[in-house]
Image (cartoon, coloured by chain):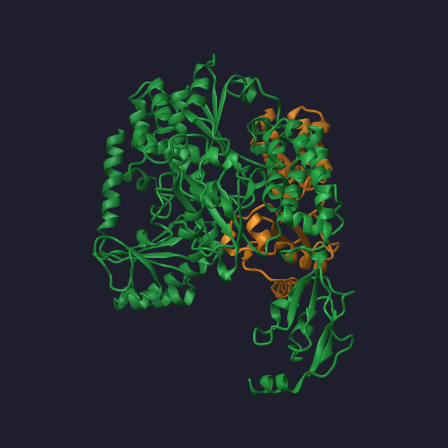
Amino acid sequence: MTFNKIRSQAVSEWEALEHSDKPRILVGAATCGRAAGASGVLEAINSALAQHNLEAIITQVGCIGLCYAEPIVNIIKPGRPHIYYGNLTPELASELVEDYIINDNPRPDLALGTVGDDDIQDISKFFELPMLKPQVRVALRNCGLIDPENINHYIANGGYGGLVKALAMTSEEVIEEIKKSGLRGRGGAGFPTGVKWEFCRKSPGTVKYIICNADEGDPGAFMDRSLLEGDPHAVLEGMLIGAYAIGATEGYIYIRAEYPLAIQRLKVALQQIKKYGLLGDNILGSNFSFNMKIKEGAGAFVCGEETAMMASIEGKRGMPRSRPPFPAQSGLWGKPTNINNVETWGNVSAILQRSGDWYASYGTEKSKGTKTFALAGKINRTGLIEVPMGISLREIIYGIGGGIPDDKRFKAIQTGGPSGGCLPESLLDLPVDYESLTQAGSIMGSGGMIVMDEDTCMVDVARYFLSFTQAESCGKCVLCRLGTKQMLNILEDICRGKGKPESIDLLLELSEAVKVGSLCALGGTAPNPVLTTIRYFRDEYEAHIEEKRCPALACTELITYYILPDKCAGCGICLRDCPSEAISGGKRLVHIIDQSKCIKCGTCLDVCPAKFSAVVKVSGEQLEVPAEPVPVTASKATTEASD
Amino acid sequence: MEPEVKEQLDDILSHYSGESGDLIPILQEAQGRFRYLPSEVMLEIAKFLRIPEGTVFGVCTFYAQFKFTPMGKRIVKVCRGTACHVRGATRILDEIVRRLGIEPGDTTDDLEYSLETIACFGSCALAPVMVVDDNVYGRMTPSKVAQILGDTKVAVGKE
């Protein structure tokens, strides 16, 4: 079957769906949607439909990116605009079937927004929402909109058109188009993709490999998982185009075993392209032949490093080796190899479908195009976003993310995961591009963006990242293996109030040593979280060391919980919930925390009713409280009795 | 090796041609089947691939996925991603460690529970997150741990 025939079939299938006389229901069912309860919502919709003898077309789609509003459902009634509903429960979902599908009440109270020409009263336009308006979705163009397990949906939306175009060009022309787009590696390092391909293309040899790096290991990063779950074909098409340009005959997708749904989607997608003649020998009747395999990672963060990844595919311990030779000269099994990250491949297919110039029209002079970020932490609207390069951190945090919850103060934003750094409020107007972030001491990284507020201790954050990199060091380089361990020891001491006046200087010295003494980026960037927190939040280190005080009230060994005797109503809730039985008291008796038994879990603070707010957390000070339970004052006893 | 184990292992090996790149996929399948890697299984895999036993063991110890002791019936996983960390994952983990009496990576003596930490579950919007078998629990607090593990214990008792 020719591709034109495949495409016209796909288009008519898609149009039939678009103009169906049955209602359509799209349920966001990526891993995070499921974790938020999408399966329960789906069941509720199915049973409500069955109960009313209604027929509807239900499609499970990937992540639309509004994680804060999961589970999300999009209901499309014939001739009506799409309506997105968020924060659904099984009960609300069944209500929607009755209210909207049967009785035509669009329930604006549950709606997030509409898509389509017509307006619906009291519901705003979905893509005009503050979270979505500044976004430009290139890599994520289909996520949440198509059925990721139906290749025809992808093809009907322009899919594999990029490959068809590429096959009509010479390999050199394809590389030129990628160069023109200005696309740089989205795994974090930012090496120009077209240049990287050219190296591999020009490397002598008949057997060449390409690899898709889907070993997304940074804590706080889930962009690649979402893309693979929501639109696997976008990545596969990018790989096919890359293989053609480079002259590769075989490809690998190295993916974390922790992503079972993404693996399943890839397996389905590979079968589909094989069936359509888009994979295998003489693809679409051309001279280009190519095969792909999935390799599951086995739980080693360092395998995200390209030479470690190749060792792992070869069945060895995933330890990086020195470069040169670069993978483009001698990579997998000694053959020229090109590795790109999931998002990079996802952009490649879009660039060939549109054009290099179109892609380069977004972004800044040196950082072209768009970048996906996983926005999380202390932020109102967590989500998966894609924005043009050069957007400011402020616009991401306050415009898209909606600012910090509970009226807390913004403290820092962490980019680049364990290899990146924490940037303070004074840098909020920094444009997000490779150079600016590096200059500020952080990195672009793969796209994790964690917002931290006044309750986050920056010394603890540095300790947290060091404990991660220290545990994930493969052990090959002495400074990465032992230097990070020493740095971690020092940071743990500081967090315990055992830091010494010379600790900060020692950390700086060790950081420099670990940077230059490590072969790969894991060690080379491991000190970044420490260096940036010292650079921008030195006062917090000093408070821990000199005053034995944690200003954010986060380091457990430096904080104390007290029950204020003039506020405690003796209600018994904290006493009952305390896991270490550290609280004494009784009905109408002021409760007292036995500090020798307290494990600083904070349960008492969580459970103390807001109307009393009797539990406080302090650091660096001692409060006067009674040693034994005493009767509560009369006024509070009446307050409680009247409730 | 018990005949039953041998039979299952042979079944796994029959899908592979014996190239060096097959080692990790074979180990993954074996671990999936036996829930850990008994030493006789590792030795047999070395023989099949015609590589030194030490190489197999070296690969097994390198990757966190491979276990050398049987896993518990229930696997409790705590996400240690950055979003979970800043939203209090340490408190959740401390409470689970206290309740189960084991450290991450360990299994209780009665083989009921294994405790693991994962770098990031990718459900950052629900932070902090813990997972018991396939059930994801979001927006965790230490007191919710008591409820969840309490419930789980009752369920185990009924089996």
Q: Residue at x 24, y 49 (%)?
A: A18
Is A131 positioned to the left or the right of A380 in the image? left
Is A429 positioned to the left or the right of B103 in the image? left
Q: Residue at x 71, y 25 (%)?
A: B52
Specify whether residue A161 is in view. Answer: no
In the rendered view, tell whether residue B150 sits above or below residue A262.
below
Q: Quadrant of the C terminus of chain A?
A: bottom right
Chain drawn green in the picture = A
Q: Position of residue A227 (x, y in %)?
A: 43, 42
Front-most of A202 and A33? A202
Is A158 positioned to the left or the right of A396 in the image? left
Task: Tally the numbered discs.
Answer: 0
Q: Position of residue A322 (x, y in %)?
A: 61, 22
Q: Quadrant of the N terminus of chain A?
A: top left
Is B17 positioned to the left or the right of A482 in the image? left
Q: Quadrant of residue A217?
A: top right
Specify whether residue A420 is in view. Answer: yes
* Rendered shade, chain B: orange
Front-most of A583 and A264? A583
Front-most of A518 and A568? A568
Q: Position of residue B6 (x, y in %)?
A: 67, 37
Q: Quadrant of residue A370?
A: top left
In the rendered view, tell whether residue B49 sits above or below residue B28.
above
In the rendered view, tell whether residue A420 sits above or below residue A112.
above
In the rendered view, tell whether residue A614 sits above or below residue B122.
below
Q: Position of residue A529 (x, y in %)?
A: 60, 41
